[in-house]
Amino acid sequence: VNIHPGDVHTIAPEMPAMFDGMKLAAIATVLYFLVRCLNLKSPTAPPDITYRDTPLNRYVLKSCPILTKEYEPPLLWGKSGHLQTALYGKMGRVSSPNPCGVRKYLLMQDGATATFDLFESLGDHRTGDDITMVICPGIGNHSEKHYIRTFVNHSQRQGYRCAVLNHLGSLPNIELTSPRMFTYGCTWEFAAMVGSIKGAFPQTLLIVVGFSLGGNIVCKFLGENRINQERVLCCVSVCQGYSALRAQKTFLQWDQCRRLYNFLMADNMKKIILSHRGSLFGMNSSKMEDADLSRLYTATSLMQIDDNIMRKFHGHDTLKEYYEKESCVHYIHNINVPLLLVNSSDDPLVHRSLLTIPRTLAEKKPNVIFALTLHGGHLGFFEGAVLFPQPLTWMDKVIVGYANAICRWERHRPPLTSCQSRVTICHSHFFFIF
């Protein structure tokens, strides 16, 4: 074969270097977006605590040090509020236990059947008192959810009896006995559960706990009537939004993909409602019509479902009226028992503008502590070193730690002194006044 010099094509020496440069640029771009999306450069820090300087609050923050220490999420993904929220929503918790409980049934005045699960403690409480955690889960949740099971098991081991409300219509194997299901701010079922616990255990004291939508319900319940606060030691609310009316506009924004979360939550609500279609739309006493069912099929947001379906269960004329009357923001200032409000800055469901509500409350009322973490997402709060999260979350530890501190305070309450009149407001990460 004769090869002529003109037939040979050589690659310029700078070509491999150019290809290597393109690879490096592509890798650098991918790494940049990973760092940005995973928020890897964000620091870890203690929660930002807002509280008034009172003996109770000083004692609680000293006795519950987890509130003033750095919250350290898993390094590779834990600083992303989206991944924290997605992992909670998809998996719930790691190695979720199976606490053994008894299901209780309560017949309501309107014919509805409320249910809750009762879990006895796995040992004596450290104070020697009989104390029950009354727990209200998040939207469409119940006692069988992994995050609830994990928290219940942790509380049981600390000496707490636990009662968990199953939201009306949330359990797939429990049929509705009236044309009504749970709504954003209806406290009837939670009140029935609390009344049942008080009747069954006359000596017990209560710790009230609410997650997300459950936080709105428990705060509204306590603020509706002073009688509801009897035998209540304290209340803890985690990741709630405080005002549905103010949250309405933010839930339609694409900021932090909130509009996508809205769509996904609406789709889940549609499935729950349609699973009880016969009870909600087929009974003679039902307030629902065929037109409402047609609108449900086409709904793409929680607000559309609330306007077409949920508000009608309690006879609200407009969506605005429903949101105004069912939001705890109008009742929470009536709570006089110690109150811990917990939120996360990177919660994709709760807009930052809503956090002025708990912060202002903590500045004004001496019994309120507001803790705001940098990370945690919505009900995530996973802890871990690099990749794998621990079975117990920061949220689980904080609630029980705060409850333990309040129980010790009540057991060994110091005498009233003149320093209780001090009104210093503290905004800090780990600041005490002793």
Image (cartoon, rainbow, N blue to C red):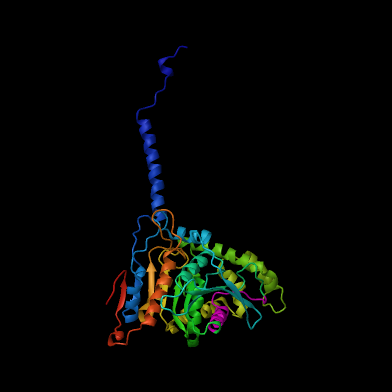
| Residue 182 part of the magenta segment | yes
| Residue 216 part of the magenta segment | no
Residue at the image point whose x is 62% and y is 71% from the top: 169
Reply above or below: 260 against 184.
above
Residue furthest toward the top?
2
Q: Is residue 307 left or right of residue 402?
A: right
> Which percent across, then down, holds residue 30?
41, 47
Residue furthest toward the left?
434
Q: Quadrant of residue 299?
A: bottom right
Reply above or below: 82 against 327.
above
Q: Is residue 271 left or right of residue 247?
A: right
Q: Is residue 10 left or right of residue 119?
A: left
Q: Is residue 17 left or right of residue 304?
A: left
Residue at the image point whose x is 60% and y is 73% from the top: 103
Q: Viewer-proximal residue, 137 or 38?
A: 137
Q: For the magenta stretch, what is the residue range?
A: 177-198
